[in-house]
Structure formats: C-alpha cells, structure tokens
Amino acid sequence: MKIRKNDTVLVIAGKDRGKKGKIRKALPTKNKVIVEGINMIKRHSRAKGQARQAGIIELEAPMDVSNVMFICNKCNKPTRLGFSFLSDGKKARICRACGEIVD
Ligand SMILES: [Zn+2]
C-alpha cells in the first residue's frame, strides 16, 4: 500500500468527499485507512464494569484506500504515487504530478 500513517489525503468518495485529513492508521492487510476526522461513526457503548462509561462515542471508521487520494507535500496537489529506487537501494515514493520524492 502506498499510503502511510501521517500522510495527508483528500477524500474522493463517500459522505466526506472533498475533505482533507491526516492518516491516523493504515491497515494494509485490509486495504483500508483511518483518516482523522473523516468517516465518523457513532457507537453506542455499554458500560463494561467500571472501566468504560455507557453512552455514545464517536470514532473514525476505516475506509477503503481507493476512496482517498494522496496530497503531495511538495506541490500540494492530490496525486497518484509511484515508486522509485534510490541510489542506496531504498524504495522511495514519488509524486507523479511534480516528480519529487515525498518521503
Ligand atoms: Zn508533487
């Protein structure tokens, strides 16, 4: 998966379309991401002993990685990412819009 934790993304599908957020968590095995403040769901929680309070909590639901687009931190455009190998053999992510290495 090309998108990682702390990347800024643009939501391109769903009820939060057009919003931007930061990746809180990437779930590569499920091809999903959790984006800060995006795709909020309400969960009703019951008190479990004394550890948890009963009530409604809001949290971010994981969303499909195909519903977000990476925003380049160099050119500030939503873009697709490519991979390139650096001279030291490391794999780096490349912005397809401006060609800069983004990590
Ligand atoms: Zn760029």
Image (cartoon, helix red, strand yellow):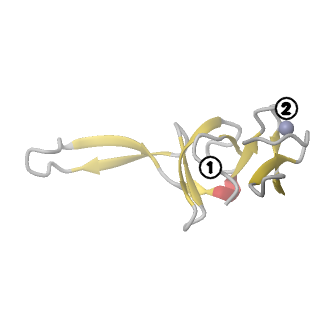
Q: Earlier in the sequence, mark 1 or mark 2?
A: 1
Say whether mark 1 is within 8 Å of ligand 1: no
Give residue 51's quadrant in the image.
top left
**On-image quarter of the N terminus:** bottom right
| In this view, 81 is above or below 73 | below
| In this view, 101 is above or below 81 | above
- Residue assigned mark 1: 4
Within-10-Å neighbours for mark 1: few <14, some 14–19, many 20+: some
Residue 39: x, y in percent? 53, 46
Which of these two is toward me, 103 or 19?
Answer: 103
**On-image quarter of the C terminus:** top right
Give residue 32's quadrant in the image.
bottom right
- Residue assigned mark 2: 75
At a point 55% along the width and 41% down the height, the residue shown is: 38
| In this view, 35 is above or below 86 | above
Q: Would you say residue 73 is visible in this rendering?
A: yes
What's the amino acid at mark 1? Arg
At a point 82% along the width and 51% down the height, the residue shown is: 80
Determine the residue located farthest toward the front in the rendered image.
88
At a point 38% along the width and 41% down the height, the residue shown is: 58
At a point 80% along the width and 31% down the height, the residue shown is: 76
Residue 73: x, y in percent? 75, 33
Say whether mark 2 is within 8 Å of ligand 1: yes
Q: Mark 1 to mark 2: distance in Å?
A: 18 Å
What's the amino acid at mark 2? Cys
Ligand 1 image-quadrant field: top right
Q: Would you say residue 12 is visible in this rendering?
A: no
Checking the image for residue 69, the label placed there is none
Determine the residue located farthest toward the bottom in the rendered image.
29
Q: Is mark 2 on a helix, strand or loop?
A: loop
Residue 98: x, y in percent? 91, 39
